[in-house]
Image: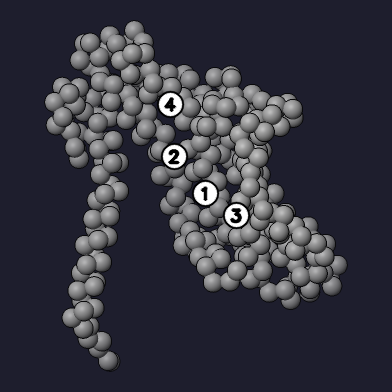
Amino acid sequence: MTHYKQSLGSKLFDTGNYIFLIGLCIAMLYPLMNTVALSLSNPEMIIQGKVSWFPRGFNLEGYKYILSDHKLLKAFGNTVLYALTGTFIMLLLTSLLAYPLSIPDFVIRKFITIFITITMFFGGGLIPTYLLIRNLHMLNTFWVMVIPGAVSAFNVILFRTFFKTIPIELWESAYMDGANDIRILFQIYLPLSKALLATFGLFGIVGTWNGWFEALIYLNDEGKYPIQMILRNMISETDSSSMNAQTFQLIASMKLHGKNIKMAAVIVTIIPILFIYPFLQKHFVTGMMIGSVKG
């Protein structure tokens, strides 16, 4: 067996690379660890600035305050519904648009591709978009959270690129056997695109889960708010200028600090996303390579 002997330069590079990656991990982990620590620490320790990596003391009042708010639980359900429905619609519509663009015999595929590409550089803007949604009677409805951003030019181009890597012979043989395009897409192309669907499904869920601007602009009913909108309002309410009587009383009795509430709300909202990633990670690396070689 031949043993490969690293040169001094290679060893120095590997050492530097390890140090850089460890530093990067620490830089990414510290904000999360600090958030958890602040959510669980005693108010006195937070005021004294003694909380960093680990909780000082043990205090669950922030979580009790958050979970006792029925608006948060309602918003949690809304966000799950928005994320699942919006991601499904995004994957479906993007696949339906990208599939014909990957077929060489499709006559107007070049025109549609150019038209889609133009939308990546020019947009109508917020006010025209708002007026359009208002004229479509979508304001303050469920669909305003899942329809307007369902199709992205960037996603369509990447889907098309991936579909073009599937051998055209599969399409030709299925077409000769009598299969129509809908059947070919759903029974051949999409089953071969699990990495693609998993990766963009994860992006879609995370994007919807973290979204709040659409709710701020298009929703007036608190019963339809996503969880990030409720979190935003909670953070505003814990500021000294707008604190409600219950929170002020808890803080005055030193059982709770404003940061307990803020950080507990952050942890509650990110836990579901942390549990989704492990189920999709086996497809994630493959999906991230889409479009890196063939355009």
> Marks 3 and 4: in contact by CB < 8 Å?
no
Residue 31 visible in image: yes
Q: Is 281 rendered above or below residue 126?
A: below
Front: mark 3 or 2: 3
> Marks 2 and 1: in contact by CB < 8 Å?
no
Residue 203: mark:
1
Front: mark 4 or 3: 3
Choose the circle earlier in sequence order: 4 or 3: 3
Q: Is residue 172 left or right of residue 163?
A: right
Residue at the spot of label 3? 154
Q: Is residue 81 left or right of residue 65?
A: right
> Marks 4 and 1: in contact by CB < 8 Å?
no
Q: What residue type is labelled 4?
A: Arg
Q: Which residue is drawn at 52% across and 49% down?
A: 203
Query: Could you tell me how far apart the alpha carbons at marks 1 and 2 are, in whole angstroms?
Result: 14 Å
> Marks 3 and 1: in contact by CB < 8 Å?
no
Q: Residues within 10 Å of mark 3 (few under 14, many from 20)?
A: few
Query: Could you tell me how far apart the alpha carbons at marks 4 and 2 are, in whole angstroms?
Result: 18 Å
Q: Is residue 26 left or right of residue 76?
A: left
Query: Could you tell me how far apart the alpha carbons at marks 1 and 3 are, in whole angstroms?
Result: 13 Å
Q: Residue at x 66, y 69 (%)?
A: 164
Front: mark 4 or 2: 4
Q: Which residue is drawn at 37% across and 24% down?
A: 235
Residue 272: mark:
2
Query: Could you tell me how far apart the alpha carbons at marks 3 and 2 are, in whole angstroms?
Result: 26 Å
Query: Could you tell me how far apart the alpha carbons at marks 4 and 3 are, in whole angstroms?
Result: 29 Å
Choose the circle earlier in sequence order: 1 or 3: 3
Q: Which amino acid does label 3 sit on?
A: Phe
Q: What residue type is labelled 2?
A: Pro
Residue 101: mark:
none
Residue 232: mark:
4
